[in-house]
Image (cartoon, grey):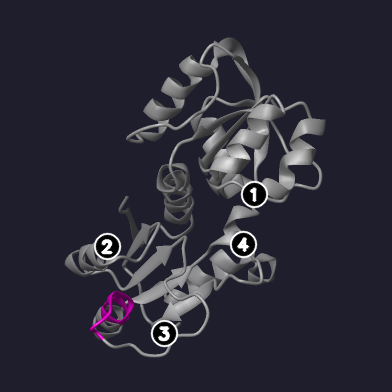
Amino acid sequence: MTKVKDITSCLDSLFPRENAESYDNPGLLTGAYDREVSVCVLTLDATLDKVEYAKANKASMMITHHPLIFGGILDVCEENVSGKILSSLIRSDISLFAAHTNLDKNHEYSNDVLAKVLSGEDIIHIDDIECGVAYKLENDTTLGEYCAIVKDALGTSGIITYSDPGKKVRKVFVQGGAFDEEVISSLKADGIDTVVSGEIKHHVMILLEQMGISCIAAGHKATEDVFMTHLADVLTKKFPEVSFLVSL
């Protein structure tokens, strides 16, 4: 019988916790390593509705991308939302595990996946950039056309861009979640003409536009849900006796 520790050991080998950013809090957040697992739910965030989904499906484990707990907590009082979620997980004996920035830095499970969903060809890993990948589009495409492709591929409710929809898109940099402005100089040097991310600060969008780089903000959740779907497929092959359910 598969136990929590078997799955977490696999996840730790794929996404070493020492690779996480200093502010992050990946790993086992509730539950016990010796708990048996027959149903595991993967989702971006451990929200109240996702915990109820796990309970309804008799799951004994949840895997999220974003940790429920960042830094210290002062209480687990059910008068606040985080306390209510933690209490529900503990009472239901559900082990919660998070893989966040340590997952982001494994391209094969994060931005490579996103790039392929967005029709990326010849995926390139740029030196000095830990999170995010570049790729070229096979056919000539305008920004307006590519915005439509991104919207449809991710099933997002909308796209934000400040750039001319007639501009050409040839070499794209994609970074799921939030865009890291520290990589801008590397993108410029690498000839990137378009950035796709979940969220991009307004002033950063303007800066990129002034540098000749178009921006597409497609939504934090939409750009990272694909990570969890891919991970569920991988885990299903490794642990065929466990039912891995994805709740987006």
Amino acid type shown at disc 4: Asn
**Front residue (pair 118, 31):** 118
- Where disc 1 sits, the SS reads loop
Q: Disc 4 designates what residue?
A: 102
Q: CA distance from mark 3 to mark 4?
A: 21 Å
Check if mark 3's residue and mark 4's residue have beta carbons within 8 Å.
no
Residue 232 higher or lower than 152, as above or below: below
Amino acid type shown at disc 3: Ala
**Residue at x 45%, y 71% (from the top left corner):** 97
Q: Residue 171: name its quadrant.
A: top right
Q: Earlier in the sequence, mark 1 or mark 2?
A: 2
Q: CA distance from mark 1 to mark 2?
A: 28 Å
Amino acid type shown at disc 2: Lys
**Residue at x 33%, y 76% (from the top left corner):** 82
Check if mark 1's residue and mark 4's residue have beta carbons within 8 Å.
no
Q: Disc 1 designates what residue?
A: 180
- Where disc 2 sits, the SS reads helix
Q: Disc 3 designates what residue?
A: 32
Amino acid type shown at disc 1: Asp
Q: CA distance from mark 3 to mark 1?
A: 35 Å
Q: Disc 2 designates what residue?
A: 50
How would you classify the magenta stretch by its main secondary structure?
Answer: helix
- Where disc 3 sits, the SS reads loop
Part of the protein shown in magenta? 78-86
Q: Residue furthest left?
A: 56
**Residue at x 47%, y 46% (from the top left corner):** 230
Q: Is residue 80 magenta?
A: yes
Q: CA distance from mark 2 to mark 4?
A: 22 Å
